[in-house]
Amino acid sequence: QVQLQESGPGLVKPSQTLSLTCTVSGGPITRGSYYWTWIRQPAGKGLEWIGRIYASGGTNYNPSLKSRVTISRDTSKNQFSLKLTSETAADTAVYYCARGNTLVNAHYFDSWGQGILVTVSS
Amino acid sequence: QSVLTQPPSVSGAPGQRVTISCSGSSSNIGNNAVNWYQQLPGEAPKLLIYYDDLLPSGISARFSGSKSGTSASLAIRDLLSEDEADYYCSAWDDSLNGVLFGGGTKLTVL
């Protein structure tokens, strides 16, 4: 059973860069059938897909965040990471990492981390 | 950013059946499968339905999904108080080249 755990600072100053890490246990992130995703949720609001990194290392991002987002991985630690630059209060949210899976034209997230609250404030 | 439209709230009494709709377009629901997630208060979302109508292991058969054209629905029968949660639909969007979520529907069990 795969498990995911987010880690990182809970408070980021405006204009600075948010850096979060997701540690995966129960299987290698290099396994070809899965991809690894970041999703966020502002308080009281819905879910927003940020982007993903494939087992191969390729990435794709939400166009609305693409200019500020980088998702990378450290296969030796079985971790993947999120960097979001130029933080503003609008980036305050719970950030989730999740495992993505694909079946034909279904792209779904079958395992989630517990989430980490990141507040952008001076 | 949600272009998958869900009703903000639905409600039902214990034992009843409720449905939650999710409306999209040809670039998402019309051309790709729909998935549903349940988010209990204070918890991370959990996969409830994938590929329109498939249940992951461990999910109760009281939950079912369907899709027609550019709309999809989640049905919950024999409603329990523990079903009180937020429900989200999602689908791949070919224009976005990414995953879209609906705005979420809060289910209240009366």
Image (spheres, coloured by chain):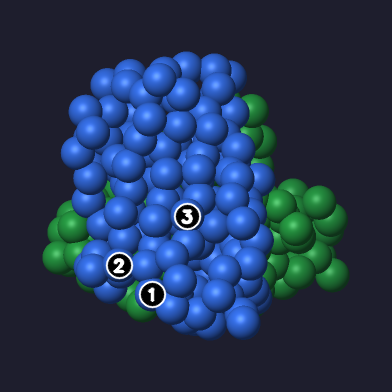
Chain colours: A blue, B green
Quick check: can you spot residue A111?
yes
Chain hosting mark 3: A
Q: Position of residue A47 (x, y in %)?
A: 49, 64
Amino acid type indicated by mark 2: Arg
Q: Position of residue A1 (x, y in %)?
A: 58, 19
Exactly how many numbered labels are in the figure? 3
Sooner in the amino-acid sequence: mark 3 or mark 1: 3
Mark number displayed over residue A86: 1
Query: Is disc 3 placed on a helix, strand or loop?
Result: strand
Front in this rendered view, residue A59 or B59: A59
Front in this rendered view, residue B15 or B93: B93
Disc 3 with disc 2 on a shared chain: yes
Sooner in the amino-acid sequence: mark 2 or mark 1: 2
Mark number displayed over residue A68: 2
Question: How dense is the environment of label 2, judged by Cα within 10 Å: few (below 14), some, or many (20 and up)?
Answer: some
- Marks 2 & 1, CB-CB < 8 Å contact: yes
Amino acid type indicated by mark 1: Ser
Q: Residue at x 75, y 60 (%)?
A: B41
Disc 2 with disc 1 on a shared chain: yes
Mark number displayed over residue A19: 3
Chain hosting mark 2: A
Q: Position of residue A100 (x, y in %)?
A: 39, 38
